[in-house]
Image (cartoon, rainbow, N blue to C red):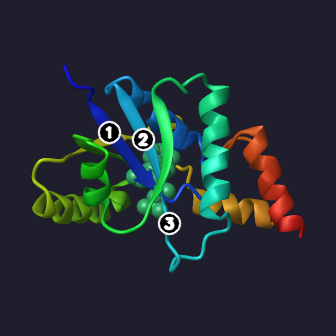
Amino acid sequence: MTDKIAIYPGSFDPITFGHLDIIKRANALFDKLIVAVAYDNVKNSLFSAEERIKLIQQEITAHHLEKTVFTSSFSGLLVDFAEQNKAIAIVRGLRAVSDFEYEFQMFGMNSTLNANIQTIFLPASKQHHFTASRFVKEVARLGGKTSDFVSKNVALELQKKYAT
Ligand code: ADP
């Protein structure tokens, strides 16, 4: 039987406990999960794509997921990237209702572009409902504690970014 491969795309700027929770849960559903960092030159990210991948990779190793979870970056159409990687599904996390509209539209576009690739929505776990990279960055920028939302490693890298 062929491996069931899924893509978990996003900005991951930086990776949070919410992302990690989705990674672990998607990992239990598929044979192989590719966490794909969007190489987006338009969106102003704090960490470069290389830095974001490195931080994800460190979490994967720390949680012993390296046998089945991989990292990559992509630019261009997500469904093309998914097809190139022989993925059968795109995984997305859903926090509040506010995520739903955007995610549903993205599903609509992607499923029209390539009907063979399914979108799987995983609801955020209770404890991660309010965790978002955007707010974590804001807390770090203002000198607040981020350790409830990101790993020690990521918290340190955030501190370094805002110290300069
Ligand atoms: P985007 O840049 O598209 O907002 P992110 O990089 O922030 O994407 O997140 C990638 C995916 O992870 C999205 O599907 C997003 O909804 C999901 N996600 C982000 N934070 C959480 C969280 N705390 N719990 C569950 N899913 C999350």
Residue under the image location 36 percent in, 59 percent down? 99
CA–CA distance in space, label 1 to label 3: 18 Å
Name the spot of residue 65 as percent of width and height, x first: 54, 25
Residue 28, placed above or below residue 49: above
Q: Which residue is mark 1?
A: 6
Q: Is residue 68 left or right of residue 98?
A: right
Q: Earlier in the sequence, mark 1 or mark 2?
A: 1
Residue 153, placed above or below residue 79: above
- Identify the residue at the far right of this view: 163
Residue under the image location 30 percent in, 35 percent down? 5
Q: Which residue is mark 3?
A: 39
**Given contact means CB atoms under 8 Å apart, are the residues at marks 1 and 2 in contact?**
yes
Corner quadrant of residue 78: bottom left
Question: Quick check: can you spot residue 94?
Answer: no
Q: Is residue 138 left or right of residue 113?
A: right
SS type, badge 1: strand
CA–CA distance in space, label 1 to label 2: 6 Å
Amino acid identity at mark 3? Tyr
Quadrant including the C terminus: bottom right
Q: Which residue is mark 2?
A: 34
**Given contact means CB atoms under 8 Å apart, are the residues at marks 1 and 3 in contact?**
no
Residue 62, placed above or below residue 126: above
Observer-nearest of 131 and 105? 105
Name the spot of residue 34 as percent of width and height, x first: 42, 41
Observer-nearest of 52 and 17? 52
Q: How many marks?
A: 3
Q: Earlier in the sequence, mark 2 or mark 3?
A: 2
